[in-house]
Amino acid sequence: MSRPAPEFLLPGVDDPAATETGVILLGLDPGRLLAGLGLTVLTGGDDPALVALAVDRARHGAGPVEFAVLLAAGARRWQAVRDTLPRDPVADASPRAGWDRTLRSLAACGPADAGPAELAFLAACRMRRRAVDDASAS
């Protein structure tokens, strides 16, 4: 018996660009999410896409800060704020809908000192909490 092919849905033309950035962040491994969070904490970066690119450079040894330093800073920040983040027990079938709801929730009730990139990385970490918790404990 064959499985149906996965369906690829393009975003709606009225969807905010941040939603697609969020979908990309959700595809990163937990280490990169934590390193991105660490980079936002250390530098105050405000563009999540540029932060993700800088993390990738650091991962390949081409950044001004070592990947391990970013990872450790992100793990510390995650452990400091994870239990204060709003909880949403309802799981969405759509990553885009879940992303939008999580990001709005964090913007309203997340850390007051978090900029746009940090909120984006926190949203991705929140949505992938189990894997990020495991990665931050190592």
Image (cartoon, grey):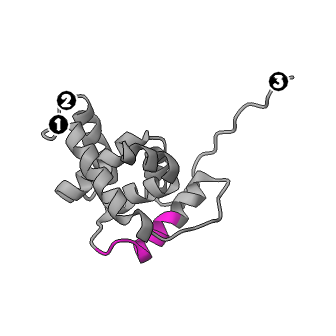
Q: Identify the residue position indicated by label 3 in the image.
A: 2
Asked whether 31 falls inside the magenta stretch, the response is no
Marks 1,2: beta carbons within 8 A: yes
Q: Is mark 2 on a helix, strand or loop?
A: loop
The type of residue carrying mark 2 is Gly
Residue 88 horizontal/vertical position (percent): 58, 67
Q: Residue at x 28, y 48 (%)?
A: 51
Is residue 103 highlighted in magenta?
yes
- Looking at the image, the residue that sits furthest to the top is 1
Label 1, label 2: how far apart the Cα atoms are: 6 Å
3D distance between C-alphas at marks 3 and 1: 45 Å
Q: Give x and y (percent) for residue 104.
A: 48, 70
Q: How crowded is mark 3: few (under 14 residues within 10 Å), some or many (20 or more)?
A: few
Who is closer to the viewer here, 12 or 68?
A: 68
Residue 52 sits in which quadrant? top left
Whether the residues at callouts 3 and 1 have beta carbons within 8 Å, the answer is no
The reply, left or right, for residue 127 in relation to residue 135 is: right
Residue that numbered label 1 is attached to: 63
Look at label 1 and name its amino acid: Gly
- Which image quadrant for residue 101? bottom right
**Crowd tier of the residue under label 1, counting other residues whose Cα lies within 10 Å: few below 14, some 14–19, many 20 or above:** some
The quarter in which the C terminus is drawn is: top left
Q: Specify the amino acid type for callout 3.
A: Ser
